[in-house]
Image: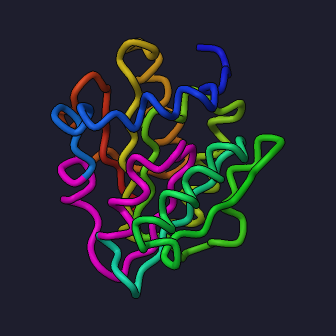
Amino acid sequence: MGHMVCPWWLGYFLLNPLRRVVQSPERVVGPYVREGMTVFEPGPGMGYFTLPLARRVGPRGRVIAADVQERMLASLRRRASRAGVADRIETRHVTGGDPGLADLRGQVDFVLAFAVVHELPDQERFFAEAVAALKPGGRMLLAEPSGHVSEHAFEATITKAGAAGLWVERFPSLWSSRAAVMARP
């Protein structure tokens, strides 16, 4: 499990409309996100999940999307503007292993960590900061691509999340992914 970052150009493939057939953003996040929530999404790419999240949180909610690649964020901002949800999305360009959560202590209702944790150089730091940012009872959906992350590696990631204070609620079935819904007690 190296810490390679998804190349920016691959973001266009991740936006493929056919992906919705097997991995609908609305079905993936629908059970966890509602109007008025604050959502944090690390590694949003060009916004495959970000735009649907922004629609779900509505005008009173917000989505904070943090990425190490400015090109991904620039594309996300353009797409959000065209979709009319740019005012609900805050993008953060993060560097040096900073998850971008330090100023969100106790403010986040939901974290969507989709196909990104295996790319992080410091998973322990990410989980510690995510737990601090989550409100009590806040949840995280952690999903990793089964083609990149072995079952053993995913279990190790779950252990790190548990050490930071997240409890596994369930293991949802998501196409081509290993996934867990975790909560901050």
Q: Residue at x 40, y 46 (%)?
A: 48
Tell me which segment is drawn in magenta.
Answer: 26-55
The percent position of residue 5, horizontal first and vertical second, equals 65, 26
Residue 132 point in image, percent of width and height: 59, 64
The structure residue drawn at horizontal position 69% and vertical position 43%, both measured from the top left corner, is 71
Give the x, y percent position of residue 2. 65, 15
Residue 173, relative to residue 24: is it above or below?
A: above
- The part of the image, by quadrant, that contains residue 4 is top right
Residue 59 to residue 81: above or below: below
Left or right of 176, for residue 128: right
Image quadrant in which the C terminus is located: bottom left
51 in the magenta segment: yes
Question: What x and y, as percent, mark residue 96?
Answer: 83, 41
Which of 136/111 is in front?
111
**Residue located farthest toward the front when viewing the structure as drawn:** 82
Furthest-bottom residue in view? 60
Lateral position of residue 58 relative to residue 128, left or right: left
Q: Which image quadrant is residue 76 in?
A: bottom right
- Residue situated in front as seen by the camera: 180 or 76: 76
Residue occupying image coordinates x 53% and y 35%:
116
**Residue found at x 52% / y 79%:** 87
Q: Quadrant of the N terminus?
A: top right
Q: As displayed, is residue 177 above or below residue 135?
A: above
